[in-house]
Image: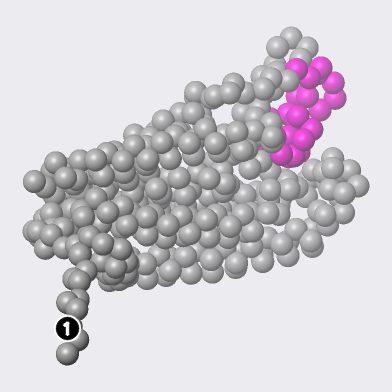
Amino acid sequence: MRPVRPVRPVRPGGPEGDSDGGHVMIWVTWRQHRAQAVACLVLFAVLAALAMGFGIQIRTAFRSDGLPGCLASSGGAGCAAALTSFVDRFARGASSTIIGVPLTAIPGLLGVAVGAPLLGRELERGTWRLAWSQTVPRTRWLVTKLGLVTGGLVVFGAAVSAVIAWYHEPLDRVTSRVQPGPFTGGGLTFTASLLCAFGLAVLAGLLLRNTIAAMVAGYVAWEIPTTVALLLGGPIRIPAPAVMRIGCAAGCPGATAASVPPVTGHLGDYVLSVTRSGGELVVTYLPASRFWTEQLIQGGLYLAVAVITLGAATWLLRRRTT
């Protein structure tokens, strides 16, 4: 009779165990964060509905005021009154506030709400003893969760920025994208700010071992890079604003920083100040071409903080739980 060969057991750390552990980690991450994922979907749906409603209204007014033809024929010089009225209604009106306020608040609030429980809840409730004693090592456990949750936040941030870019497109043709409102919700800044708050809250949860305390600490800490970004976009500007000197001819006495078209003659420029110096107007402004430069500077600041805090949380995980 042929002897039966014994079956070699599969080690938990082997390839099969790694594969099973990876699937389990994805499932566990989804179960723990599905409420937050649903909240993000609802939040995005509300923002998208508001942006769609206001965006259609803006496009209708843009066409009915005859601005496309005026911009094509004279670059806006022949319809200054219509441009000013359009900008006052939509760039400085209620719709701008309704869209702009959530865009300012969402990154900090959502980031800490998602990041603080990721480690803080496990440590607060003591469930880490079970979660980190399985076949998946704790470092891989954290890296997997961070990868999945961070990916979800990036998708959410990119989707919000895309919707806001569509909503603001007619206004971008007659105003500057470098000014605070459109700058906050476009480009890289929104998503980078969201990841910054998330990283700070994850690290706070590891250090404080309490979800609520981590949310408060993470939000307060997030205000620091946010303040630095505001300074970079306000009193401290890197690179320095451009300066234009205009000989004071007809129309100079009425020129202001809020003139539409701006005194630089280019609709995309963001005029910071207009002062008189002898027979000239000295105009300090941000050229339209500065948009992506400013985005990379401020977005890079947020991303640097996010990378540092998430890296520190991963490195400290084993030492804080032994």
Question: Which residue occupies the foreground of this view, 141 or 4?
Answer: 4
- Report x, y in % for residue 67: 81, 53
Q: Does the rendering let one see residue 212?
A: no
Looking at the image, the residue that sits furthest to the top is: 278
**Which element carries disc 1, helix, strand or loop?**
loop
- Crowding near the residue tagged with mark 1, few <14, some 14–19, many ≥20 C-alpha atoms within 10 Å: few
Q: Does the rendering let one see residue 58?
A: yes
Question: Which residue occupies the foreground of this view, 194 or 177?
Answer: 194
Q: Is residue 273 magenta?
A: no
State the residue at coordinates (49%, 28%).
Answer: 232
Is residue 242 depicted above or below 289 in this figure?
above
Q: Is residue 245 left or right of residue 196?
A: right
Is residue 136 depicted above or below 240 in this figure?
below
Is residue 304 depicted above or below 113 in this figure?
above
Q: Is residue 262 magenta?
A: yes
Q: Quadrant of the N terminus?
A: bottom left
Looking at the image, the residue that sits furthest to the front is: 1
State the residue at coordinates (67%, 66%).
Answer: 56
Question: Which residue occupies the foreground of this view, 26 or 1?
Answer: 1
Residue 242: quarter of image: top right
Amino acid type at circle 1 is Pro
- Report x, y in % for residue 253: 75, 24
Prevailing secondary structure class for the magenta stretch in the rendered image: loop
- Magenta-highlighted residues: 245-269
- Report x, y in % for residue 298: 49, 35
State the residue at coordinates (39%, 48%).
Answer: 195
Q: Which residue is mark 1?
A: 3
